[in-house]
């Protein structure tokens, strides 16, 4: 039996995030995918570091009642800033006597990594849930530090103040413009051209920014068509990240848990789903965005060969006429002989007899008999 190659061999995946992009690329690359990164937003760290340090010193000296941690990267950035100022240990010790509220599993994970345990976690990863919870419990007269996420204050402080609390913001980082705007624009055009199997999002602002570029360049309808035809999947790390995609009419893939590892597993399961393979007499054929694989091994086929394989694999075992295959070939040739030449070259490149000629009718894939 021929050993199978990596399950994502031949797969092209676009990652739109700057945060954790390297981790995503490595995890997907280990399974055979080729990953392109085009961050739709940048991260501007330590907007006003002197103010953040002054607020931290004040918290250490005078204490506070509640600290709301909204993002893992923001909390880690806060600790890094405090450590660089020589007060990192004092900050962690001060937080041990404070009620800690985490906005989702990433914020909880960052707290736990620092040896701290949150008192409560908003599993929906929304500030609205935090506001509802704290307001219901009562915060009148309490001092509440809110570590802002990248988009800044989203109304949490206003609601806590309305409930009688005394909130103040800790600005550790904010979203900024993309580090390479040309790469984002190119990613939109390449996605619309069908050059990716998946586009991955790890934050709602990042998803919204990429969609804004899609709308700006008039690529919405084409990307929707690719998703509908199952030639493209948009994947989000969690429901909050998925909201802008759903609002734009897309149906994103979501992991069971809003974690990066779970997102990778969901992509591997979806893109490697055996039900999407064509069972030929030579093994499992899969047509990806820019490549075809047989038993997860990349086949050396040309763009013309890939177009023919995609047409034949769309209805496995059905006969496609020369005219139908000619219609899907790149270029504008109207000579039916071009289809015959392309099929002959494809057969030679594949080295496997899985494209059959049906006399006077056309061509079909040699599919395996049902067991």
Image (cartoon, grey):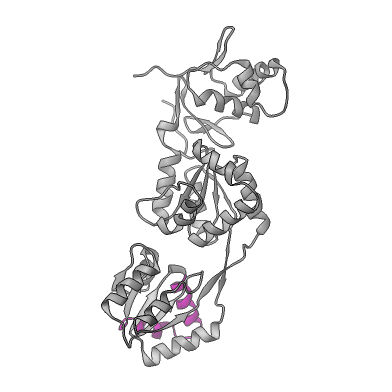
Magenta extent: 74-98
Q: Nearer the viewer, residue 215 or 187?
A: 215
292 w.r.t. 86: above or below: above
Q: Provide residue 369's location: percent of width, then percent of height.
A: 39, 16
Q: Quadrant of residue 175?
A: bottom right
- What quarter of the picture does the N terminus occupy? top left
Q: Residue 219 or 230: which is nearer the viewer?
A: 219
Q: Is residue 79 left or right of residue 192?
A: left
Vertical comparison of 214 with 229: above or below = below
Secondary structure that dominates the magenta span: helix
Residue in the image at 70% along x and 15% along y:
337
Count of labels in the image: 0
Where is residue 87 drawn, in percent x and y? 44, 86
Against 161, residue 213 (above or below) is: above
Of 264 and 120, nearer the camera is 120
Viewer-closest of 297 and 191? 191
Q: In this rendering, is residue 281 above or below 19?
A: above
Q: From the viewer's perspective, is 142 left or right of 242?
A: left
- Classify residue 304 as left or right of residue 255: right
Q: Is residue 314 visible?
A: yes
Residue shown at the point (70%, 19%) measured from the top left: 338
User: In the rendered structure, does residue 282 fall within the stretch colored magenta?
Assistant: no
- Is 85 part of what is drawn in magenta? yes
What residue is shown at x 34% (from left), y 68% (from top)? Answer: 129
Q: Position of residue 86 (x, y in %)?
A: 47, 86
Residue 81's x, y, as percent? Answer: 50, 79
Q: Is residue 85 visible?
A: no
């Amino acid at each position: 039996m021929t050993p199978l190659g990596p399950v994502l061999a031949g797969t092209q995946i676009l990652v739109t995030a700057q945060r954790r992009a390297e981790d995503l690329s490595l995890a997907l690359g280990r399974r055979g995918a080729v990953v392109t990164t085009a961050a739709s937003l940048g991260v501007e760290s330590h907007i006003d570091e002197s103010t953040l340090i002054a607020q931290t010193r004040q918290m250490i000296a005078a204490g506070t009642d509640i600290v709301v941690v909204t993002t893992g990267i923001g909390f880690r950035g806060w600790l890094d800033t405090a450590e660089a100022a020589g007060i990192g240990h004092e900050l962690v010790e001060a937080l041990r006597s404070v009620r800690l509220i985490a906005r989702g599993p990433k914020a909880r994970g960052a707290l736990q990594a620092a040896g701290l345990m949150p008192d409560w976690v908003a599993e929906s990863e929304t500030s609205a849930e935090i506001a509802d919870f704290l307001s219901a419990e009562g915060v009148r007269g309490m001092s509440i530090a809110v570590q802002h996420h990248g988009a800044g204050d989203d109304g949490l402080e206003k609601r806590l103040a309305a409930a009688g609390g005394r909130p103040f913001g800790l600005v550790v980082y904010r979203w900024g413009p993309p580090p390479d705007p040309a790469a984002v624009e190119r990613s939109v055009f390449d996605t619309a051209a069908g050059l990716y199997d998946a586009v991955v999002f790890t934050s709602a602002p990042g998803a919204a920014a990429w969609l804004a570029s899609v709308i700006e360049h008039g690529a919405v309808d084409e990307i929707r068509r690719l998703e509908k035809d199952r030639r493209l999947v948009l994947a989000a790390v969690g429901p909050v990240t998925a909201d802008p995609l759903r609002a734009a009419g897309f149906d994103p893939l979501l992991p069971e848990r809003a974690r990066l590892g779970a997102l990778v597993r969901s992509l591997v399961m979806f893109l490697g789903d055996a039900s999407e393979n064509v069972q030929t007499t030579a093994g499992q054929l899969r047509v990806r965005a820019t490549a075809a694989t047989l038993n997860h091994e990349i086949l050396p086929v040309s763009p013309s060969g890939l177009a023919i394989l995609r047409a034949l694999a769309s209805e496995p075992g059905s006969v496609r006429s020369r005219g139908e295959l000619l219609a899907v070939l790149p270029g504008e040739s109207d000579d039916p002989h071009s289809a015959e030449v392309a099929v002959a070259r494809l057969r030679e490149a594949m080295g496997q007899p899985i494209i059959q000629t049906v006399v006077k009718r056309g061509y079909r894939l040699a599919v395996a008999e049902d067991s």
